[in-house]
């Protein structure tokens, strides 16, 4: 008899991955499973990989039904979390995988997302200093975005240590297509994405304020690219060094005790396939011989450490469970 | 303090998947991990996804070291299992993922594989009638080949029930590239396989005798195709009906109590991505309106139910563990 | 001052490939370029690969504007060709890439497609006996469907020669995703199709009547599979032999003088990547050692010989141009 | 009766693309076609897409046979061009696709490549100021590397105009796998590259000196990434602005008369698939709202404008042919 968790927005890719992780979790029972347009459908028709719960039926997002859980995961389209969260009683813990409650600065929210700012919840990246305890003490957590998680784990310790300048950070990050969601759009068709690398929102991406807030960067150029693969983010983060410190050693020290963030042995560089299906982030760093810039490469699964697995990690902390329960450090590859 | 299992041939794709499953298995400890040309390498360099055991070092295949295990998995190149198996004491159980001990008919072995026939071990497909008990009682098991597993699960119950004719079976099956192994060959380069469907060994494939033995087919045309994806086999199996029985109902009855073989609800057809990373086989069947042939489509993960996960399922039976321990029915998708 | 050809339905994948071929054609000028929902868009926004005509604007399908051409290609959604064709004067030649005018048998049309049968035009596969002259003499041609072209080129000569039985033909064919069109649908998203093989319309596909009509088959099982690549069809066609004739020699004789159908040297099997961007079909055949069935493997580009390039080949014949003008036998690979 | 050109190193990917372009070229005849380990093989076995010349046989690289051409393309492994070039008479023109003769600075060569510097030939990028005339007047041309071409077309006009600072340039560029060649290596297997983004030679890539020489950059951080697609390079180039000039307008002015370099309309960003099979480079630029950096995104086909098509463009100039002969501005997509 474990704790019960529910998933609102279970028909999307992050929702499906949450269901997979919850089904295999040793301490969690699956409560309500809700969706919007797919309400009434069987899970097996929406997520045919989820055989173990394929006969379950998606229901509409009824706050009362969700409130019978110990914790609710919100995996809704951006902008829809606030309304549903407001209808959940305080005793029900909530992890929101959307952007609604991530930003501390309301004006940034309004400039990049538009509309009123819903508020600020505890930021769900346990590897940031002090954040693990804060998450454990919180009833409301806003999980980190997938790009922000990839970049923050690479950069935050270097800026915090005074080793990398917070100005003039340059990031190029490529993501698998599941990061763009499951809504049918022409530019996301297999015929379009296979064989293609395609940049988007160049020069002004709405995730920049979150990345700056989480990393401590003051100015940052961020170019995202859609890559021909279902899962994974690879971020190349470069920054101007402020000291002679070896950035790799700074990262190693920062993550020495972390179960899910792995600074690779020298000579090995992160690549996305090694993280598929896991809650791991792989990191490596060097100093560029020509420019002198610090280069950090960071890889994770956008649906894993970038979304669903990270959310389960937060939920484990919030529910007093072992932080690593139900999560894998090993990827599924090839 | 669990049981100890070792893996010989741990550097290949089936070996890597075995290590992933063993590392996460609730009742198994990992013993020796051996390889041939890669002996001396760290696992993290060979299988970067296996963070949890990345510091382990591959050793040469020393029979004495392997003999300190309760069970040894042989994931060696075809033709190398017999020599190593002969050096393991009887008390050490063995699951061979190679073809050496699969065939009962020595002459078929010699015709298709060449060289002397090594012998015949218990065939490792628990879903065949009577096979589960036989595997549990055996110390030596020859796991089913990936194509044979896909096709046999689709066809054997129909032939056994007298519903499908054992003659004139026609099978076309496409496999992901991991089924072709990790040895560097030009035709397996990413540049060659992406965007390509490529048939091979058309008209005379060495797996035909195993498929016939396991399915009960008397004559069978089998055309394998290499598909542009890392994992998965999709087999389209057609056969002449002998009765009016609904083939789907025959399959449902045959697998009603099986944890890993799933006859899908009507209207849903198996596809490979839904089985990735799992030990599941998905099946669906109908009768073709034009030709009257029975069509069965079968999908599984060639490294999962087609190799490593199937081998762990056999090992669970041989070691008196719950048959499903450490195995997933749910796939990792997208 | 060449001949002018127009394209109705230019926003889809077949339409885009038609535009590419026409732009590079030595004897054709591009006339009207029309679309439905995309009317008003610039070609560069719809087909960014078509730089040479990127500034052209898609217009609505105005029959008067189309009628100013020597020939009109109809690349419309299935079922929309008849209405537009009826508005074009007889002096304007028409090649329809849709299914509306392919079938001779109205009852087959009604059973598989529904609705009234529009009529029957000359069938656009020049490699069928007598068909080249008939196409050259026609003002209305219905181009062959992509699956039908792949299978017919493999099978028709064998049935015509009495070498393969017209009954109990079994075909499994896998297609790249562009064959499923450019309309946004969830199951065609890159996240869904990459890493996946997915059968569809198993047991009752609407193309079966066309395939039977074109090949001479009397009963045929056809299973189509969606494959993780943008282009290409690979068909495995098996049939019961009626004689001892070598099927490969029959095919070689049938296509000895054909510029675009290539029976490969012995030992080499067709694969789709080798045909990408070309008007070629690659064939190979053998007799299966176990079942005795004839196996023919056929590969082509579903947008090339399976659609746009085939349509240009027909147009060349209809306009009195060299049959091979503007078409490539060589593929673009890797 | 055209001019005769030969290809040394015809078995690789750039060699195959050269053969495709030469076969379809209106003014060129194919002379000798040579390879090293593949000498004696038929072209159809090595490049099955090249049906039109599939019966030709690869010969050993005999300088006398090559000397019977008007021009020889060298598509050899890096480091092997100098020895063969030394054996060709001066009247035979040569385009080298390798790196041997690209660098002006011998010490850079020795530091990054090792071994003695072979010398410096005319650099084969006609779009650089003054370079078109120089190529036309040269008998020896060193074609631009694929990464260098992608980056130089994006950056050189901005540095030359004083709009972008030559210091602290940051480039992240991802390439399809054909850029890594056709030699069988484990990390290039389809099973490894599909679903994966993998950086390499981070912090010290041997192409940096060429990129700096061609772009005018003084310090540059370059991180290359292997992407899961056969063809294409996407480079994200960022630089510090020195003026308020719109970088897009600078690029438009620089390439206004160029047939193969296309600054896209505002709002459209380059992506690799649109350039496949063509000699086009697509560019777009903006100023990042947060960092103020200039961002230029550049896309081309690494085998097209990045190698074989660029080499044919140079050859056209050297042989007095129309510069665009036999080359396509339109890509083959999807």
Image: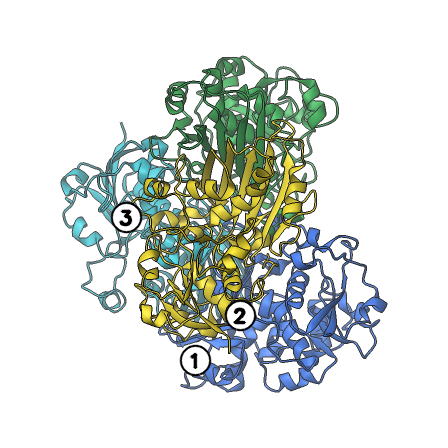
Chain colours: A yellow, B blue, C cyan, D green
Which secondary structure lies at badge 2? loop
Q: Is residue A220 left or right of residue B67?
A: left
User: In the picture shown, does residue B182 fall above or below A296?
Assistant: below
Marker disc for residue C75: 3
> Which chain is indicated by disc 3?
C
Q: Which residue is mark 1?
A: B248
> Which chain is indicated by disc 1?
B
Which secondary structure lies at badge 3? loop
User: In the picture shown, does residue A309 fall above or below B284?
Assistant: above
Classify mark 1: residues with Cα within 10 Å, few (<14), some (14-19) or many (20+).
many
Pick the front one: B136 or B326: B326
Which secondary structure lies at badge 1? helix
Q: Which residue is mark 2?
A: A24
Q: Residue at the location (69% across, 18% down)?
A: D106
Is residue B95 visible in the rendered image? The answer is yes
Disc nearest the viewer among 2 and 3: 2
Pick the front one: B250 or A42: A42
Classify mark 2: residues with Cα within 10 Å, few (<14), some (14-19) or many (20+).
some
């Amino acid at each position: 008899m474990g704790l019960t968790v529910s998933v609102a927005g279970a028909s999307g890719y992050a929702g499906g991955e949450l269901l997979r992780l919850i089904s295999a979790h040793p301490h969690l029972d699956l409560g309500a499973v809700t969706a919007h347009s797919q309400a009434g459908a069987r899970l097996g028709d929406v997520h045919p990989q989820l055989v173990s719960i394929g006969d379950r039926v998606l229901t509409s997002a009824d706050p009362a039904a969700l409130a019978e859980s110990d914790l609710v995961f919100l995996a809704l389209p951006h902008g829809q979390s606030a309304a549903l969260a407001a209808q959940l009683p305080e005793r029900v813990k909530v992890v929101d995988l959307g952007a609604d409650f991530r930003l501390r600065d309301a004006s940034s929210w309004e400039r990049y997302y538009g509309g009123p700012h819903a508020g600020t919840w505890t930021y769900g990246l346990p590897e940031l200093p002090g954040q693990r305890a804060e998450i454990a003490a919180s009833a409301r957590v806003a999980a980190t975005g997938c790009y922000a998680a990839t970049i923050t784990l690479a950069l935050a310790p270097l800026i915090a240590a005074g080793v990398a300048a917070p100005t003039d950070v340059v990031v190029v990050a490529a993501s698998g297509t599941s990061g763009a969601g499951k809504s049918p759009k022409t530019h996301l068709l297999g015929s379009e994405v296979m064989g293609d690398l395609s940049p988007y929102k160049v020069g002004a991406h709405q995730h920049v304020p979150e990345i700056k807030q989480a990393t401590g960067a003051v100015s940052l150029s961020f170019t995202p690219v859609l890559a021909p693969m279902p899962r994974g983010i690879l971020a190349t983060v470069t920054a101007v060094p402020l000291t002679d410190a070896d950035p790799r050693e700074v990262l190693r020290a920062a993550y020495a005790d972390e179960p899910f963030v792995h600074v690779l042995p020298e000579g090995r560089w992160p690549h996305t396939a090694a993280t598929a299906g896991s809650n791991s982030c792989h990191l490596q760093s060097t100093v560029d011989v020509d420019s002198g810039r610090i280069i950090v490469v960071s890889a994770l699964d956008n649906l894993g450490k970038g979304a669903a697995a990270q959310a389960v990690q937060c939920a484990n902390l919030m529910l007093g469970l072992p932080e690593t329960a139900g999560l894998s450090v090993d990827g599924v590859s090839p």
